[in-house]
Image (cartoon, rainbow, N blue to C red):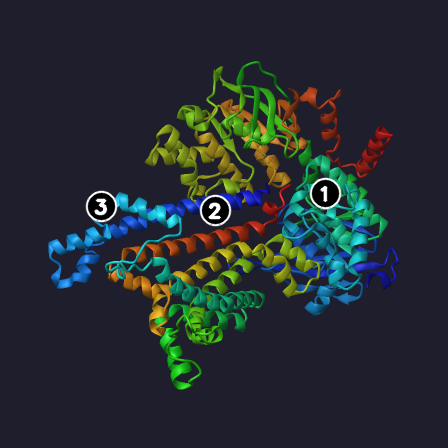
Amino acid sequence: MASETKRVKGDVLLEMKGIVIDGKSDDKWNPIIRGVDLTLKRGEVLGLIGESGAGKSTLGLAGMGFARPGCRITSGSIIFDGIDLIAASEEKRRGLWGSRIAYVAQSAAASFNPAHHIIDQTTETALGHGIMPRDKAEADARDLYRRLQLPNPDTIGLRFPHQVSGGQLQRAMTAMAMSCRPDLIIFDEPTTALDVTTQVEVLAAMRDIVEQFNTAAIYITHDLAVVAQMAHRIMVLRYGNLVEEAPTRTMLKQPTQAYTKSLWAVRSLAKKERSSDDIVLDVQNVSASYGNHIKVLDDVSVKIPRGRTVAVVGESGSGKSTLARAITGLLPPSTGKILFNGQALPGALKNRERDTLRRIQMIYQSADTALNPRQKVRDIIGRPLEFYLGLNGADRDRKVVELLESIELDESYIDRLPSEMSGGQKQRVSIARALAANPEVIICDEVTSALDQIVQEEILKLLMKLQADTNVTYLFITHDIATVRAIADEIVVMHKGKVVQQGLKSKVLNPPYPAYTELLLSSVPQMDPDWLTGLLKKRQSAQA
Amino acid sequence: MHPVLKTVLQRLGLGMITLFAVSIIIFSSLALLPGGYAQNILGQGATPELVKNFNHELGLDRPASVRYVEWITNAVQGDFGNSYSGTTGTIKRSVSAIIAPRLYNTFFLAATAAIVAVPLSLFLGIMAALYRNSWFDRIINSVTLTTIAMPEFFIAYILVYVLAVKLRWFYPNSTVSANTPFLEHLYRVALPALTMTLVIVAHMMRMTRAAIINLLAAPYIEMAQLKGISKSRVILRHALPNAWAPIATVIAFNLAYLVVGVVVVEVVYVYPGIGQMMVDAVSSRDMPVVQACALIFAATYILLNLLADIVSIITNPRLLHPK
């Protein structure tokens, strides 16, 4: 048991050598991890970074001796505190899981069982392994909730997962992982699904508790600035290979590999702002709600200049996507009006002329759900050409190829299905579908959020190029400040259904800030490893 | 009011409306049947004059809409009218009195079969999910598929041949009367209940298995595994509580079948249930009896589906405990 183990900081806790892991796709086994070594000392936090598909989760889980269904560890050795995890029986591994090696998953909302109270799930590990009796485990859970600064730590456990916020749930999951005081915790993108302001608290809580109990951790993320706050050492993975490994500060200052440098470079993309007085879309005092509940949009006024990019920023629940739904007519406003080229738009979609519909198009966050998986690119892009412009047959195909060229895909893509393209290519097709209607305004709803950084940069560059060519207007909804810096002319800051601030990029991103803008901007993680510590200190002294 | 209670009352109200609509369909479709009670009973001697008198006596010469309104008004007060077949002169046999003992027998058989079949299929379904793709899983799947694939009368005759004729453990027929003692009744329905169980287990068991396996890819199941919990606990505590909704729907469907789909089994075992009676009533054009039976069948379906809805609501904490 964990408490009996003699803990000496600096001892090797986990040693993985020559790990090769295969994944099954289309009935063939392909390598996901191609021979990686990993050593972790007691009390050390190792950052594992890379883009999606780099194999970081797979490698992290292998540290528990676990392979997801459809994966298998084909060679290498995994020694955890003297125990060979590959040779060990399943029974033996299960004895270690939860008690000595714990896992914190990406989405707490999905990883908590919706059917049970939070505290029962927190104590389940300790009870299941027979480490402590129920009353003691529950008292300990409440203590952990308190240490993780959850509100109402004595009663929050009695709630169901859907009754608390995502940030609270993520901390509750950390408490769950901590319940048996494991020697090692695998954090698998634990803050990726959270808003930046929530992320700060969760990061601080996780870092503190890991330090308090001298727990070793593998921290998996694609966000460099986050890993810089958490890890002592960083490993960069790509295509299942180790690219580079160094202590955090060294890695940030002097990355040696070209790939690592390119990851660092993405955040430097920035566009010069241009102002304009030609307003294409004028949202005036719009309020809207779902059902008869609270106003999701509360007296929102936004002016969108033609041929420019207006970024709408805010956290989840701020109403930024609802604003898009109101403009497109999917959710008719309850009060207020929307002027389009000076003319009032009918509130509901079904009352709008087809040509008005054509002029306002949308691109969605997830191309996977926005594209019909059974349609080929020809039909996906061809449909708006047919519907809005009446093009058919060869004319239509010619135009599709033209559009493919404009999104920098060659004409061979015309017969592909969405499943035969990468995430970035699918998002390009979504862009082409919006462009096909020859619109004046395109609403981009978190279009780069699901993409890797390098792909993000390509998509942003493409959007800017298309704007230069066609003078299309973008309403760009995002929660990512780096994206805003890269693409916006103007910025609208939203919070709880209200507009906090609207103005040119240079104005909004520079002081003086309204209180909420300040909170939002200061919560964006920086590459400086002392950023989180400094921020917490500053906030504490401001409160005192 | 708690939102769940509100939903249940809403569904109940909708159920009533459905039942009302069904009553119209039943009445009008029966009115479209060729022939009538008079022609049927008089046979060769059905002169137009006699038929007219007969129909006048039964009130059948009035317009259908009038008869429907009369029927439904009485029915909601619990009076399903009098059977034609018993009506001679002043002696009248009320439909309720004819149906009641038959209905009791049908529910008795259905309940017996359900008490065996439902727990059995849940157990087999959970075991099959736990040991999925094992030999146990395959055998249980093919055996239950075989029993569902065979016509029920065939299963019934095999059971009679083996268990009653050869082994003499049971009676080959299930004749009971109002005076049959409870245990004797139970013993007599053993074979028909077993037949029905074999027919419905496959469906429920496969849905239980599928509903559980469907959830095994959920992140919270992976999380439970990585907490070092035993396999059976992962299934029972983490998958099953979230799988009730589809399972309940299929159980409700099969329970309804136990009530309304039993006529073949009743005939084979000569069991005096409601299915047998309805068939007789249809062939003799005894409309009040047919209408009452059809209405009871419809109500059974609606109520059982309502129960399934309620189960899916109360097993979903998002609905039971709103934010």
Q: Residue at x 39, y 62 (%)?
A: B100
Determine the CA span between mark 3 and mark 1: 71 Å
Using a 10 Å C-alpha cutoff, classify the residue at mark 1 as few (fewer than 14 neighbours), some (14 to 19) or many (20 or more). many
Which label lies toward us, 3 or 1? 3
Label 3 residue SS? loop
Q: Which residue is identified by label 1?
A: A168
Q: How many angstroms separate mark 3 from mark 2 (CA)? A: 34 Å
Q: Quadrant of residue A40?
A: bottom right
Dot 3 crowding, Cα within 10 Å, few <14, some 14–19, many 20+: few
Q: How many marks?
A: 3
* Residue under disc 3 on the same chain as residue under disc 2: yes
In percent of width and height, residue A423 lies at 55, 43
Mark in the foreground, 3 or 2: 3
CB under 8 Å between discs 3 and 1 = no
Of the residues shown, which amino acid type is indicated by label 2? Leu
What's the residue at 38%, 68% (across, down)?
A: B149
First in residue order: circle 3 vs circle 2:
2
Amino acid at circle 3 = Arg
Q: Which residue is mark 2?
A: B12
Q: Is residue A298 visible?
A: yes
Secondary structure beneath label 2: helix
Q: Quadrant of residue B221?
A: bottom right
Mark 1 to mark 2: distance in Å? 38 Å
Tell which subunit mark 2 falls on.
Answer: B
